[in-house]
Image (cartoon, coloured by chain):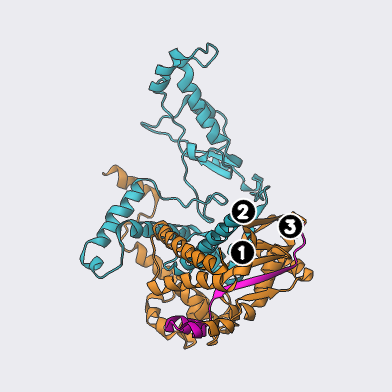
Amino acid sequence: MTEKDLSVEMEAFIRQVFEQNYEELRLDSGHAIAPDVKLTALNQVILYWRMLSEIAKNVTDTEVRLSLPGQETTRGRNYIIEGVVDIVRDNDRTIMYDIKTHNADYVRGNLNVYAQQLNVYAHIWQHLRHQELDGMSIIATDYPENVRNALASENADELTHALSTWDPTVPIDFDSHKVKQTIAEFGEVVDAIEDGHFSPPPLDRLNALVEGTKLKVRFATHVCRNCDARFSCKSYREYAWRGGRGAADRPMAKYFAEALPDEEQEAWRSSNLETRETATDLRADFTSR
Amino acid sequence: MFDAAEDKGDEGPVANLSLITQYLSRFLDERIAMITADLLVEKTLQIVFFSYLYSLYRLGESELEDADDPFPKGRVPFLTIHQSKGLEFPVIILGNLRKENRGPNQNEKIVHPLLNRPQGEPLDRMPEFDIMRMFYVALSRAKNLVVLAHFKGAGQRINKPFNNLLNGDFPRIADLDLKTIPNAELKEEDLPKSYSFTSDYLLYQKCPRQYMIFRKFSFVPSRSQTMFFGSLVHRTLEDLHHELIRRRANA
């Protein structure tokens, strides 16, 4: 079988399993996604195959569960770190990849987050498998705008050109210091979760721009706008209703006014309830029935 | 409400609200394919509130279940003795000291003569032993203090052993000095818990409040496209890789 035949055959295979997976997920979750979003998902997989078939063909492990037991937080809690590595390729060199449906620019802009993750995964892998890794990398499957336009134009040359300008892999450097630091931060998060610290991020954070987004998007737009709990969130309310931003959400303000003071609320709640001050009254009430 | 759950330690309202999101989402999955204005015309809301939620309530589907953390903080759990089996509390109140002996249960009566086991409990004493075992479970749940409800008056009966106990020299609530009760101690889990890098650590770092609502209390998010999209791409890529590995092995 020639390279070309394999390529065509695998694309047919992708389309077929993609439809199956879509149907399964749709029935499983009871939800669906819009046709254009579905097409984007399919395109991400097809383009991954077209651009990175060398990686795909040499994959030796997929969905590798990793766990790092025996960790202890500063407050003395024992815990286990768990993660799943998407693929590991092992022919001439052993390389660990994590596949994200994010944009490569976003990944580069927030490299530290991804570097933390892959460094910890690599640490666990080498620890468990006693096998050195030669490299690690993020594969960002969300394609850039020029690729999107080229796909829409259905012009093969334009697509070839657009793909040549796109690099979906973002290599990550090994950094043993980062492993230690991340595990320490991980422990702090475990303590915070177990101690019940769940305050929303402060207003500054909501106003801050998210790195790696083309149109300089704020945290509030990037994260909060997709969060169902935003109207019950102190920080978001501050942001949307006093800070003059989030205009689209402002009409909601009247439904989420500050809760009534306790006394007022209690009066409202009990105004229609018959109350008896003392136990004697209450008993009299019962016997008279 | 979410602030109160965090600051004042009353998780009850949040736990209940989370259950309602789960009920509604289940209802939508089963009954409503698409949200349209028709729903306002038809009696959908009536069905949701009066039929669906009421059936759930009648079926006893009303407690938040979290294996690691069975009861919302700031609430007093009311349990049957059978529900409390295997659990421990600093203080328990046993509200009913009466269990009628209604004779051996029908199944036992049928099965007993068929068993070739002469040393077992005699059939006529079995219900008595069962009642003893049940109250043993109830009384052994407490770590520091048991309070027994001592009903008196017409029509109030309690089982004889309790009656003997309570009519003897039994300490009364009025005599209780709370200072003599040891402080409740939080028992840390012996088994270490697992935390996922992406769905615990990274999610918490993004927003602790989101973590609390969607991960700790399992609220159902109204929009799930992002997750759907991610799962679809990842599953298909996994299938692709498995197919490639399979082909290589066959070659």
Disc nearest the viewer among 1 and 3: 1
Which numbered circle lies on residue A49? none
Q: Which residue is mark 2?
A: B249
Which numbered circle lies on residue A57? 1
Local crowd size for mark 2, using a 10 Å CA cut-off: few (<14), some (14–19), many (≥20): few
Given the image, on which type of amino acid does mark 2 rest? Ala
> A220 left or right of A32?
right
Q: Which chain is cyan?
A: B
Q: Colour of chain A?
A: orange
Given the image, on which type of amino acid does mark 3 rest? Glu
Residue sitting at x 51%, y 70%: A46
Residue sitting at x 56%, y 66%: A2
Whether residue A152 appears in magenta in the rendering, the answer is: yes
Separation of marks 1 and 3 at Cα, in angstroms: 40 Å
> B12 left or right of A55?
left
**Chain of the residue under the numbered disc 3 shown in the image:** A
Look at the picture and state if A128 lies above or below B209.
above
Question: Could you say whether the residue bearing mark 1 is in a helix, strand or loop?
Answer: helix
Do circles 1 and 3 both sit on a common chain?
Answer: yes
x and y, in percent, of residue B231 in the image: 50, 63
Q: List the single residue furthest toward the front.
A: A1
Q: Earlier in the sequence, mark 1 or mark 3?
A: 1
Q: Nearer the viewer, residue B192 or A98?
A: A98
